[in-house]
Image (tube, helix red, strand yellow):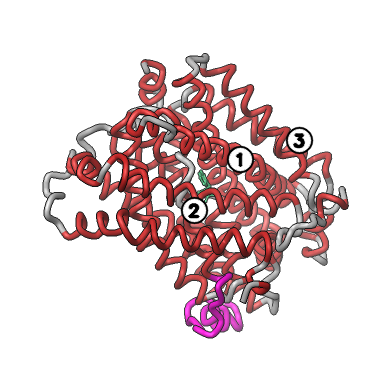
């Protein structure tokens, strides 16, 4: 494995702990937090969604994150190799399943990143802010395939370049500036949006749950979104965990990563909903929500401020997306480098090309190719949503099997031994009781039931059953 350690060594001069936390938090914080979380909250009841989301993070996601990192660190290799090494038999397939999921996530994620990149350019240097009907603009924009093709190609190219270099010092340094930058601009926009008329109606929608509004679908979306947002269920954190030193405290690192990610999602909602209500807009408008609402807010800031604040905001979104695409590409790359002993550079460029090609149907799915826009699948109106829904399912299923792996194959005792490294007070602590109980019972039971329900709902619609 010398290649991997060169790769780690290239990631900048941070202490191991900070380097890892930054990389994992960079993976977690992305379009999921700023783009997907607010629109899912908007279509699924606002505060009720937030409540269930937070419960999922505490009850299910945090223990699964600890589990993934522990598996990766113990085995010290890619997702497939880790399951194979610790589990033997057919367990490697679980890793392969995750690697495949990562491949498809990146295929559509890169398309949305291309939209955000285009918005950055159009706001900073174009005339986007002079448009009257921003909802209509977005609809036309996502079908303007020429430029979007180039933007997502550029985004994929940049991701491939960074991963092929074995993440150069630049990206860690960039991360260190970008993450605080993202927080600052988010908080600035929250303050701005809270001062607008009718902002409090938005705050109420977002923070005061109406339990009658919580439906099974609220639970399904909050659950899958929580796994997506924390980059769980497909081996990204197994892969990153394989780079973590034995002297590090996995449990506390996982807590920092979860809190960083959840706070960005929470703040994005707090920024978006007051704006939505003060602009008299509809919270449930789906994937276009932040593109339309934020742009309208930037428009109201006047031509110069709008350009500066809007441009930097979309640029930060692109950076957040980039640290996520890097982690997504790293999973199949680590697999091919570690298992097939292939050279890093050609592997990375080869997979990126393939992922880009698999992303083309998503790129063309927003109306320009009618078939891709109206799939005969329940609840997934277009190809991009369809792929994203399928990937969501694979994350909870993957996480569920990971729990079975720890519980029945690797065994809780070995898992605890790994967690105690770098954390001498782990044995006998209440956090041990909580994590053990969650991995042995709560996660496998709830994730099996919920994954089955999510699958039934996706393919048949739950309302046909009850
Ligand atoms: N978590 C990222 C986001 O919220 C997306 C992501 C990166 C991801 N790596 C992942 C999702 C691995 C699932 C699995 O934008």
Marks 1, 2: nearer the viewer? 2
Q: Is residue 148 above or below residue 310?
A: above
Residue drawn at 71 percent across, 52 percent down? 123
Disc 3 from disc 2: Cα separation:
33 Å
Disc 1 from disc 3: Cα separation:
16 Å
Q: Is residue 243 visible?
A: yes
Sooner in the amino-acid sequence: mark 1 or mark 2: 1
Q: Is residue 360 left or right of residue 330?
A: right
Residue with the mark numbered 2: 396
Residue with the mark numbered 3: 150
Q: Is residue 13 visible?
A: no
Sooner in the amino-acid sequence: mark 1 or mark 3: 1
Image quadrant holding the C terminus, namely bottom right
Residue with the mark numbered 1: 106
Q: Is residue 217 left or right of residue 86?
A: right
Instruction: Report the front residue among 263 and 223.
Output: 223
Residue drawn at 49 percent across, 53 percent down? 396
Q: Is residue 375 left or right of residue 66?
A: right
Q: Is residue 307 left or right of residue 89?
A: right
Tell me which segment is drawn in magenta. 196-218
Give the numbered dot on residue 336.
none
Type of secondary structure dominating the magenta stretch: helix
Task: Estimate the x, y position of residue 6 in percent, counting from the top left.
Answer: 38, 19
Task: Estimate the x, y position of residue 221 in percent, counting from the top left.
Answer: 56, 64
Marks 3, 2: nearer the viewer? 2
Which quadrant holds residue 298?
bottom right
Q: Residues within 10 Å of mark 3 (few under 14, many from 20)?
A: few
Which quadrant holds residue 83?
top left
Task: Estimate the x, y position of residue 278 in percent, counting from the top left.
Answer: 64, 78
Sooner in the amino-acid sequence: mark 3 or mark 2: 3
């Amino acid at each position: 494995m010398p290649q991997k350690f060169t790769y780690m060594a290239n990631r900048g001069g941070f202490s191991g702990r900070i380097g890892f936390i930054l990389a994992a938090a960079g993976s977690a914080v992305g379009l999921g937090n700023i783009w997907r979380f607010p629109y899912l909250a908007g279509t699924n009841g606002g505060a009720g969604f937030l409540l269930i989301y937070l419960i999922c993070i505490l009850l299910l996601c945090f223990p699964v994150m600890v589990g993934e990192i522990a598996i990766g660190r113990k085995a010290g290799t890619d997702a497939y190799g880790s399951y194979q090494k610790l589990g033997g038999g057919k367990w490697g397939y679980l890793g392969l399943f995750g690697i495949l999921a990562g491949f498809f996530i990146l295929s559509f994620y890169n398309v949305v990143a291309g939209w955000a990149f285009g918005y950055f350019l159009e706001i900073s240097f174009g005339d986007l802010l002079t448009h009257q009907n921003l909802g209509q603009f977005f609809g036309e924009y996502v079908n303007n395939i020429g430029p979007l093709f180039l933007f997502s190609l550029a985004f994929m190219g940049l991701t491939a370049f960074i991963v092929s270099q074995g993440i150069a010092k630049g990206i860690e340094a960039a991360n260190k500036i970008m993450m605080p930058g993202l927080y600052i601009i988010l908080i600035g926009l929250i303050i701005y949006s809270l001062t607008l008329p009718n902002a409090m109606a938005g705050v109420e929608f977002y923070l005061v749950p109406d339990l009658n509004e919580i439906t099974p679908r609220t639970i399904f979306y909050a659950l899958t979104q929580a796994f997506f947002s924390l980059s769980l269920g497909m081996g990204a954190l197994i892969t990153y965990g394989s780079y973590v030193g034995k002297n590090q405290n996995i449990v506390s690192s996982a807590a920092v990563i979860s809190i960083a990610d959840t706070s960005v999602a929470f703040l994005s909602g707090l920024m978006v909903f007051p704006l939505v209500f003060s602009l008299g807009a509809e919270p449930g408008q789906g994937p276009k929500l932040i593109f339309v609402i934020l742009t309208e807010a930037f428009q109201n800031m006047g031509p110069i401020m709008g350009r500066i604040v809007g441009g930097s905001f979309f640029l930060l979104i692109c950076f957040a997306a980039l640290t996520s695409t890097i982690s997504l590409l790293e999973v199949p790359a680590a697999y091919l480098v570690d298992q097939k002993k292939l050279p890093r550079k050609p592997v990375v460029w080869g997979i990126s090309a393939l992922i880009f090609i698999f992303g083309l149907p998503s790129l063309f799915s927003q109306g320009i190719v009618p078939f891709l826009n109206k799939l005969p699948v329940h609840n997934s109106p277009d190809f991009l949503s369809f792929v994203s829904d399928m990937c969501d399912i694979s994350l909870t299923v993957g996480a569920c099997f990971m729990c079975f792996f720890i519980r029945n194959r690797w065994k809780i005792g070995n898992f605890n031994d790994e967690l105690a490294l770098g954390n001498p007070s782990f044995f006998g602590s209440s956090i041990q009781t909580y994590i053990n109980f969650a991995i042995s019972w709560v996660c496998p039971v709830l994730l099996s039931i919920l994954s089955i329900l999510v699958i039934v709902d996706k393919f048949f619609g739950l309302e046909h059953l009850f």
